[in-house]
Amino acid sequence: MVDIGKISRDGKIMLLAYDQGMEHGPTDFNDENVDPEYICKIAREASVFTGIVFGAGIAEKYYTPDLPPLILKLNGKTGFHKGEEPVSLQLTSVERAIELGAAAVGYTVYVGSEHEEEMMKELAQIAGEAHAKDLPVVAWMYPRGKHVEGKETDRDTVAYAARLGLELGADVVKLPYTGDAESFEWVVKSAGKTKVVAQGGTKIEEMKLIEEIEQIMSAGAAGMAIGRNIWQSDDPVGLSKKIARKIFNF
């Protein structure tokens, strides 16, 4: 079993995600956070993150050893295919991730898409390759597609996605929050020994975010993978530290 200690602290995980540029285009960015150096600056100053998520191009040009451990995202898609069945296929190899200094690799599966089997095959293959190199695998297990339409955050749908991540060999699964601690506790149990982190998603009011994190952690989750709520904040470093106190309990 691969040790996730490279991307965790005392079993807890707090990832700074910056893969939105490929997934959404520059619509999430302003003049400040469009620059990857700004995200690197937040990570360095906050000094609370157990990992930072980049694609290969960003990692090659901006990642340095003084940043949190690199989780290299191996697949991705554009935001131009709205209304179509989602599919995101591998763009970068495990070997390339190692060359770029990655401590772990990431991959998205759209659970419920007509194309889920293609992504499942790739994730299973990646897990085998990464584990052979002692690299943990973080799987974005997102319920999305016509088979789960309207049920993307339902307890049983998200729990199924969590279980699928375990079955495919993921060490950590990133999932949408179901909205309450009781239902999310079932999600965590369904993942077995695979650690569960909740996605941050679109920016929400700070007090609501902190309340959700408290619920997520009380459900037994390992932590959060959070991007826009941090780097779209007026005080990203301060907010990072507030979130860290909830995740790491200090």
Image (tube, grey):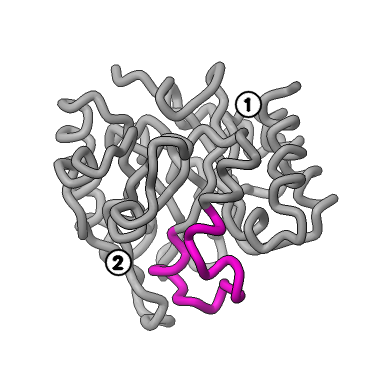
User: Helix, strand, or loop for circle 1?
Assistant: loop
Category of crowding for the residue at label 1, using alpha-carbon neighbours closer than 10 angstroms: few (below 14), some (14–19), many (at least 20): some
Q: Chief secondary structure of the magenta span?
A: helix
Q: Spatial distance from mark 2 to mark 1, Cα to Cα?
A: 30 Å
Q: Are marks 2 and 1 in contact (CB under 8 Å)?
A: no
* Amino acid at dot 1: Gly
* Amino acid at dot 2: Val
Q: Earlier in the sequence, mark 2 or mark 1?
A: 2
Q: Is residue 28 magenta?
A: yes
User: Helix, strand, or loop for circle 2?
Assistant: loop
Residue 134 location in percent, x, y? 24, 24
Relative height, residue 194 to residue 94 (above, below)? above
Range of residues picked out in magenta: 19-39
Look at the image and tell me whether residue 156 can be seen.
Answer: no
Q: Quadrant of the C terminus?
A: top right
Residues 137 and 165: in front is: 137
Residue 23 location in percent, x, y? 42, 68
Q: Is residue 56 magenta?
A: no
Residue at 72% x, 59% y is 233
Question: Which mark, residue 87?
Answer: 2
Residue at 18% x, 27% y is 133
Residue 164 location in percent, x, y? 36, 40
Relative height, residue 39 to residue 173 (above, below)? below
Q: Quadrant of residue 117?
A: bottom left
Residues 74 and 111: in front is: 74
Q: Which residue is mark 1?
A: 220
Residue at 57% x, 44% y is 43
Category of crowding for the residue at label 2, using alpha-carbon neighbours closer than 10 angstroms: few (below 14), some (14–19), many (at least 20): many
Taking the image as shown, residue 43 lies to the left or right of residue 182, namely left
Look at the image and tell me whether residue 107 can be seen.
Answer: yes
Relative height, residue 191 to residue 32 (above, below)? above
